[in-house]
Image (cartoon, grey):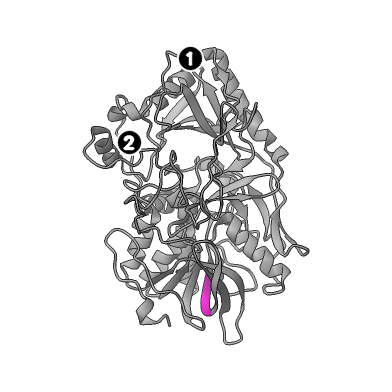
């Protein structure tokens, strides 16, 4: 059993710090990662009376820095911004074609830009995972598309039970649409909406986990600004209902949760005494290993994200620690059809110096069978007027990548190449060429490189690698290894058609309910 000294006490709003796991500990349930799937597992396991340890490679972001803030903003990135980098790697890394990334001290910062051969994958690092660094857009996928991507899952139960359960647990709320129409901080969204509608496209409001009532107070100047102070991709100091304040806090309140931060799992293998031996490195804030530990877990839940879980399982199969994992482990990875693009507006179409970092509107062209697109109208919170309309397009890109073990380097690579994103560009181009023609505007070609219009070499939405009912059974169990489960975005085959975290959460809710009912 987990030692009593390591159990977390109930928390009002966030997950407190905990003593680290000790070498040789025996735990009933161990969750690798504290993002959406891991947080659901932590809550439902602890509510079922099971003492649970969450192992997170990132920090527990609950201690203010010298400036009094836990997180830094986007305009002044420091060591808190990036995971073990010495320069920032901003999605918009250029302005007027000139690089704008900055030197920073090496540190276990909150955002990882993991580089593969053909793509950068942005991932959250810390207790709360991606919920710490995303734009909070809580979008439920179109019912017909969900049925297409996960045909083995009962659609009615997802939309009647598990999506509502996920939205409630995440603290999803809707923007006050009347306030939106006059709020200075959403001038940029209203401009893009008007241009899209005038060009024949439908727009829709987006729910969010950011507290819109708090944002109203930010606009009024009665609370400390966060979303209105260029905070988002490096964390929000206020207003955001990240997982450490929702699912993980509720799990901590049971008294059965241990969160062990700055521990990176390196191996999982059957233990001779039963269950699984889980080996991990405890790291310091510059990434150096300060201790290596092995604990025994009766059950292990892989929740390290699409990339983390896939890489770990592919490595374990190749190294002979979990040799009987299915061939499908490592396959079916996609970037959710992500591509970014920006347009230059006319001088009379001001987008506003004050911009909320939390998007609240999208362009919905998913019904276009020639190239489905759902494009969030993204902010460019530079603190000054730039006349830029920015978009993150989500498209139906059929191309997939595969994680493979490289025995010469002892590492796992991803086969995805930048050229595989051509269908995403083609779909987005149909929409934004039309808007540009109707508005007599042009693309910005100076923000993602020199003379580069499309940001096709990055993704915020990694999905797949351990696809449900292919690499696992229909509830995330890894065949041949009782007590091993996958509960994160690696279960989803490369695409959701919208921002994916609500889908990841709802699928985890479904799977945990089944596992706890049938697996004891």
Measured from the top left, where is residue 2 in percent x and y?
42, 80
What residue lies at 59% left-to-right and 33% top-to-bottom? 448
Measured from the top left, where is residue 471 in percent x and y?
65, 61
Secondary structure found at label 2? loop
Q: Is residue 455 above or below residue 481?
A: above
Q: CA distance from mark 2 to mark 1?
A: 28 Å
Measured from the top left, where is residue 442 in percent x and y?
57, 18
What residue lies at 47% left-to-right and 74% top-to-bottom? 29
Would you say 25 lies left or right of 216 here?
right
Secondary structure character of the magenta stretch overall: strand
Residue 369 in view of the camera: no
Q: Nearer the viewer, mark 2 or mark 1?
A: 1
The disc at residue 346 is: 1
Nearest the viewer among 437 and 367 is: 437
Would you say 325 lies left or right of 302 here?
right
Position of the N terminus by quadrant: bottom left
Q: Is residue 128 magenta?
A: no
Q: Which residues are magenta?
A: 295-300
Secondary structure found at label 1? loop
Q: Is residue 298 magenta?
A: yes
Of mark 2 and mark 1, the one earlier in the sequence is: 2
What residue lies at 50% left-to-right and 73% top-to-bottom? 519
Q: Is residue 1 above or below residue 339?
A: below
Nearest the viewer among 158 and 168 is: 168
Residue 291 in view of the camera: yes
Q: In the orientation shown, which residue stands out farthest toward the bottom? A: 273
Q: Is residue 72 above or below residue 57?
A: above
What residue lies at 41% left-to-right and 47% top-to-bottom? 72
Residue corresponding to mark 2: 175
How crowded pointer 2 is (Cα within 10 Å; few <14, some 14-19, many 20+) is rated as some
Counting the numbered discs, the total is 2
């Amino acid at each position: 059993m987990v030692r009593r000294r390591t159990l977390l006490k109930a928390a009002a709003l966030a997950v407190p710090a905990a003593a680290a796991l000790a070498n040789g500990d025996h735990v009933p349930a161990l969750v690798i990662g504290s993002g959406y799937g891991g947080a659901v597992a932590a809550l439902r396991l602890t509510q079922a009376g099971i003492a649970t340890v969450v192992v997170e490679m990132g920090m527990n972001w609950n201690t203010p820095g010298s400036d009094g803030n836990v997180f830094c903003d986007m305009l002044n990135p420091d060591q808190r911004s990036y995971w073990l980098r010495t320069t920032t790697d901003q999605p918009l890394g250029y302005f007027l074609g000139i690089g704008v990334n900055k030197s920073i001290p090496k540190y276990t910062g909150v955002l990882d830009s993991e580089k593969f051969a053909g793509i950068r994958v942005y991932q959250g690092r810390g207790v709360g995972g991606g919920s710490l660094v995303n734009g909070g857009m809580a979008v439920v996928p179109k019912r017909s598309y969900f049925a297409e991507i996960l045909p083995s899952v009962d659609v009615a139960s997802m939309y009647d039970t598990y999506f509502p359960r996920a939205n409630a647990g995440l603290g999803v709320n809707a923007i006050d649409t009347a306030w939106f129409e006059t709020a200075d901080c959403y001038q940029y969204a209203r401009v893009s909406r008007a241009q899209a509608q005038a060009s024949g496209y439908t727009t829709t409001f987006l729910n969010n986990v950011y507290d819109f009532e708090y944002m109203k107070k930010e606009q009024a100047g009665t609370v400390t600004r966060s979303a209105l102070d260029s905070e988002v991709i490096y964390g929000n100091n206020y207003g955001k209902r990240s997982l450490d304040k929702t699912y993980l806090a509720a799990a901590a309140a049971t008294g059965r949760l241990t969160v062990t931060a700055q521990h990176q799992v390196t191996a999982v293998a059957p233990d001779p005494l039963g269950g699984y031996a889980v080996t991990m490195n405890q790291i310091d804030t510059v990434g150096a290993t300060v201790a290596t530990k092995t604990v025994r877990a009766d059950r292990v839940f892989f929740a390290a994200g699409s990339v983390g879980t896939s890489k770990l399982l592919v490595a374990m199969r190749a190294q002979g620690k979990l040799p009987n994992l299915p061939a499908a482990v490592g396959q079916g990875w996609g970037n959710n059809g992500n591509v970014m693009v920006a347009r230059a507006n006319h001088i009379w179409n001001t987008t506003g110096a004050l911009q909320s970092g939390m998007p609240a509107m999208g362009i919905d062209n998913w019904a276009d069978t020639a190239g489905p697109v759902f494009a969030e109208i993204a902010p460019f919170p530079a603190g000054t007027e730039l006349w830029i309309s920015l978009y993150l397009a989500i498209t139906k890109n059929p191309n997939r990548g595969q994680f493979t073990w490289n025995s010469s380097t002892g590492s796992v690579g991803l086969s995805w190449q930048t050229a595989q994103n051509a269908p995403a560009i083609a779909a987005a181009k149909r929409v934004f060429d039309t808007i540009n023609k109707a508005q007599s505007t042009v693309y910005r070609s100076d923000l993602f490189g020199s003379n580069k219009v499309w940001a096709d070499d990055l993704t915020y939405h990694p999905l797949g690698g351990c696809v449900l009912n292919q690499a696992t059974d229909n509830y995330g169990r890894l065949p041949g290894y009782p007590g091993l489960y996958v509960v994160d975005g690696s279960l989803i085959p490369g695409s959701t058609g919208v921002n994916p975290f609500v889908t990841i959460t709802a699928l985890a809710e479904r799977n945990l309910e089944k596992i706890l009912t049938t697996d004891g």
